[in-house]
Each structure stands twice: as C-alpha cells, then as structure tokens.
Image (cartoon, grey):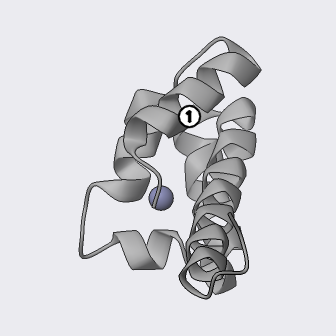
Amino acid sequence: MPPLDDHFKNSKERTGNAYEELHHWIDDNKIKAPEIHDLAKIHENIAYVHERWGEVAVQEFVLHIKEDLEHRLKENLQYFGLFK
Ligand SMILES: [Zn+2]
C-alpha cells in the first residue's frame, strides 16, 4: 500500500481536505483493513463511510482503494520487469 501521506496528499489536492481520519480508519487496524479494502464488501463500507464522513468522503474512500490497487499492480509488474 502507498504510505498514508500519499493518500492524504491526493485527497488534499482533489478536495482541499486530507481526510486523515478516513484514511487512518481504512489502513490502521491491521485486523479490519483487509475487510475494508475488500471489493466484495465495498457497498457496505461505502454506506458506513457515507454515514460517518459524508458524500465527498465516499469518493475519497473509493479512490484510496483504487490507489492501493494501482500501487500493488505497479509493484507486481516491476517485480517481473514489466514496468519501470
Ligand atoms: Zn489502503
């Protein structure tokens, strides 16, 4: 996963708000983090994020997951020498 600071910075650039509490919730709890990042559970997690932080936070939640997936894909491609 990208460092939390990257998620803060990207949210700040997009919305003017770093959404630090949201990104901490997504990544910090090592037991719950895999469930929070699980695409099969994204609808129930979106409902929770919307309830707790509002509409813009839902966008930032989904983009956090997207950034993590892109980061992982890039690392995998680099491992196989398919991406520089
Ligand atoms: Zn994450």
Residue at x 42% of width, y 29% of height: 20
Residue 40's image quarter? bottom right
Residue at x 46% of width, y 40% of height: 22
Q: Is residue 66 above or below residue 20?
A: below
Where residue 30 appears, as percent x and y from the top left, is 24, 69
Is the CB–ligand 1 distance for label 1 below 8 Å? no
The three-letter code of the residue at mark 1 reads Trp
Residue at x 71% of width, y 70% of height: 83
Side of 71 where 66 appears, left or right: right
Side of 66 where 4 appears, left or right: left
Where residue 55 appears, as percent x and y from the top left, is 74, 35
Q: Nearer the viewer, residue 62 or 48?
A: 62
Residue 5's image quarter? top left
Question: Callout 1 environment at 10 Å: few (<14), some (14 to 19), or many (20+)?
Answer: few
Q: Is residue 26 above or below residue 35?
A: above
Label 1 sits on a secondary structure element that is helix
Residue at x 50% of width, y 29% of height: 8
Q: Quadrant of the N terminus?
A: bottom left
Q: Nearer the viewer, residue 1 or 22?
A: 1
Where residue 26 appears, as percent x and y from the top left, is 43, 55
User: Label 1: which residue?
Assistant: 53
Where residue 84 appears, as percent x and y from the top left, is 68, 63
